[in-house]
Image (spheres, rainbow, N blue to C red):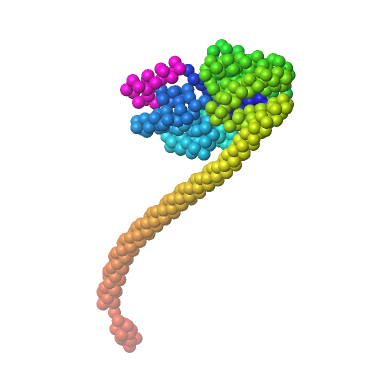
Amino acid sequence: MQRKWILIIIIHCFYSLFSQNKKNIDSLNKIIKLSDSDTLKIKALNSLAKEYWLFKPDSAIPILESAYSLACKINNPKFISATLIYKAYSYSNKNNYDSSIALYTLALKVSEINHLEKNRAGALTGLGNIFNIMGDYDKASGYYIQALKIQEANKDQIGIAKTYNSLGSLFDLQENYPKAIDYYTRSLKIKSQLKDKIAQSLSYNNLGSCYQSLKKYKQAIEHYEKAMEISEELNDLTGMARTYNNLANTYNYTDIQNAIPYHKKALELYSQMNDLTGKANTNFNLAMDYLNVKKYELGFFYLKKSESLANQLELKSLERDIYRSFYKFYSEQKNYQAALEYSLKYIDINDSLYSESKAKVINEINTKYETEKKEKENQLLNIQAKLSSETINRQKIISYFIITALLLTLTLVFFIFKSFKNQREANRIISQQKNIVEEHQKEILDSIHYAKRIQQSLMPTEVYITKILNRLNANK
């Protein structure tokens, strides 16, 4: 069983991988010690943490704590959210996923409040990576898609490339290799346009791993060789060692004799960098190579070296593989006493890992429950906020309606009052005119009556006329 390196490349390519460089470390420590600028110190502390976070995350975390304290001191939201993201990443390297989720979530909130879109997308991608590792692919893909929308809206090509790579890892871990190849290729295209050589090397390694899993070994080797060319050009020792291991693991399926020299080259580089974890795993790979070709003495030699380093570093998973291999080796050599000893060691550490695995599963279930609970609470708060907003809007509409109705009523009352006033004035005028007319009429009637009396006084009465007529008749 070969120790594979591709998983660490898939998950941790969210950031570029850093090999520890003593010169860089010394330079950064000098800036931290001598600089009067808090901003420069924060940048130097974050860069220093990157020198440690992959292989020595325990060393990175205190450095990031200092950077976070300074960022809070100067109240710089951009540095605060960035440092929280780096801390979350370091905790994920320690497999402390609940702390990582909490830190990414906090970074996300800080970024959202302060409209830091790049950091917001980074926190979302980080959360996606954690749930990807935990096997919650639906939740992981949701975070990746959110991050991608933000990055596309802001034309953040670097961010888009990283998220494509993470989506590739999502399908890679689900063994959907064609889909993984599609996203890795999209990521590689952007990285090539940006001329990000280290990122290109990682993409070629990822693609090589997919083709290896599809048993397309020729294509796998071609991609690994492209990755190697870039690493050699940049003198990236970590990248070179990683690719040598990947090439060796591919040759284990086609020509095991070619695997041995590549594993040896990887071991030389890890020794040069004093990367003890790399040395432990590569010694184990070499032991398996020699045992598979029946060179037991060399196999035993590298297996013992791997065991010593694994015990020193407490690499329990590697220790389990080593003890199982020793058991098989001693059984084939008919050294049953030694075989029994290693079988007991294997059983003990396997039980220990099983217990840890159970505890981890329980912890992950609890984390998932708490996360979902928090999400439901946030959804409820959003609903309440929405309802409150709708209530306020409704109240505003009602207020507007009442005010409008009052204004219309007042307007109507005004016009009615004005109309009444005008009518009353008109009636007054008509009444005055009527009185004038009646007075005129009375005057006219009085004149007529007066004239009539005069006329009557001038005209003879009927009695008088009758007497005159009778007298005239009598004279006849």
Q: Residue furthest bottom?
A: 474
Taking the spot 53% from the left edge, 30% from the top edge, the residue there is 93
Taking the spot 32% from the left edge, 22% from the top edge, the residue there is 36
Q: Against 370, is 88 above or below?
A: above
Residue 41 visible in image: yes
Q: Against 388, is 458 above or below?
A: below
- Toward the viewer: 176 or 34? 34
- Toward the viewer: 57 or 308? 308
Taking the spot 44% from the left edge, 50% from the top edge, the residue there is 392
Identify the image quadrant of residue 45: top left
Q: Is residue 398 magenta?
A: no
Residue 220 spot, x, y in % from top left? 68, 20
Tell whether 437 sits left or right of 165: left
Identify the image quadrant of residue 245: top right
Residue 368 visible in image: no
Identify the image quadrant of residue 439: bottom left
Tell whether 206 sits left or right of 24: right
Residue 358 spot, x, y in % from top left? 60, 42
Q: Residue furthest top?
A: 233
Quadrant showing the C terminus: bottom left
Residue 422 spot, x, y in % from top left? 34, 59
Q: Give the main secondary structure of the magenta stretch.
A: helix
Q: Against 89, is 31 above or below?
A: above
Exactly how many numbered labels are in the figure? Answer: 0
Tell whether 383 sits left or right of 139: left
Part of the protein shown in magenta: 22-42
- Toward the viewer: 108 or 234? 234
Quadrant showing the N terminus: top right
Residue 383 spot, x, y in % from top left? 50, 48
